[in-house]
Image (spheres, grey):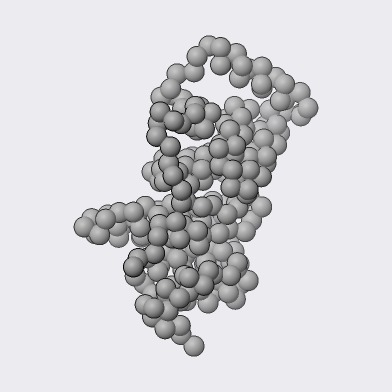
Amino acid sequence: MPMSYKFFTQIRLTCTAAVLALYVGGCVSTPAEQRIDNEPMYGQPTIPRPEFLKKADQNFITQATAGFATRAAASKAWAAQALEYLNKGNFDYAMRRYNQSWLLDPDNYQPYWGFGRVLLDRNRVDDSLEYFEKAKQLLQDPYQMPALLADIATAYSVKAYKTPASQGKDRARYFDLATQHFFQNTLADPSYPNAYRSWARSLYFEGRYSDAWEKVKKARALGATPFPQEFLNALRGKMPEPN
């Protein structure tokens, strides 16, 4: 019996201060049920922002900025709070705080990164990739880039996993894009342990079991978060663990 989609996504973890555990399982709300403040940028530009909410936005910006030197500083503070909610698995509250962070500074990479991670949790993989790429364009901090690349790689890996086997060329292309981003990730920071952990998972689902074991070994050597036993047992079922 194949492993569940939830299991597939749960074995991806990251370890830097800006990237926390992301779980992709769970139910997805229908558009009618989705609150506007739980949509990136409040659904703009697809959903026009009414005037009374634009006024409320301006009031929020004025009040939120009052305790900080700049709007950019306030945006980072709201993004930090969003990250706390994300770490607790409260994706709705995280999205709302990321929206407020975006209101304060649309040029801050953090809310776009957060949008991508919440959307990935909601199974909206293509949308998540759009925001990850926007974050990548804005990100200037080389310390954070490996973690973002890992998230992009994970999204492509999920996209490949969700692509039917009948669409073999597309499936292979998405796995290749995942591998490219994992490679860029480890090139930027060879000591980033959980990148190899995520890469091992991706390689398993691609059917590259020997390569998966190689990444498992590398992740362990660097002190990555331990692999779930369920994953290791599944990999051993495909290929015995090399000595």
Residue 161 sits in quarter: bottom left
In the image, residue 21 sits, relative to residue 71, either above or below, namely below
Residue 108 visible (yes or no): no
Q: Position of residue 220 (x, y in %)?
A: 58, 74
Q: How many marks?
A: 0
Residue 52 sits in quarter: top right
Q: Position of residue 218 (x, y in %)?
A: 54, 74
Left or right relative to 65: residue 139? left
Left or right relative to 96: residue 167? left
Q: Position of residue 24 (x, y in %)?
A: 47, 51
Q: Position of residue 232 (x, y in %)?
A: 48, 74
Q: Residue at x 35, y 65 (%)?
A: 2
Residue 109 sits in quarter: top right
Q: Residue at x 57, y 54 (%)?
A: 21
Q: Please state, as top left, top right, bottom left or bottom right, where the N terminus lies in the image.
A: bottom left
Q: Residue at x 59, y 39 (%)?
A: 94
Residue situated in front as seen by the camera: 17 or 52: 52
Residue 121 visible (yes or no): yes
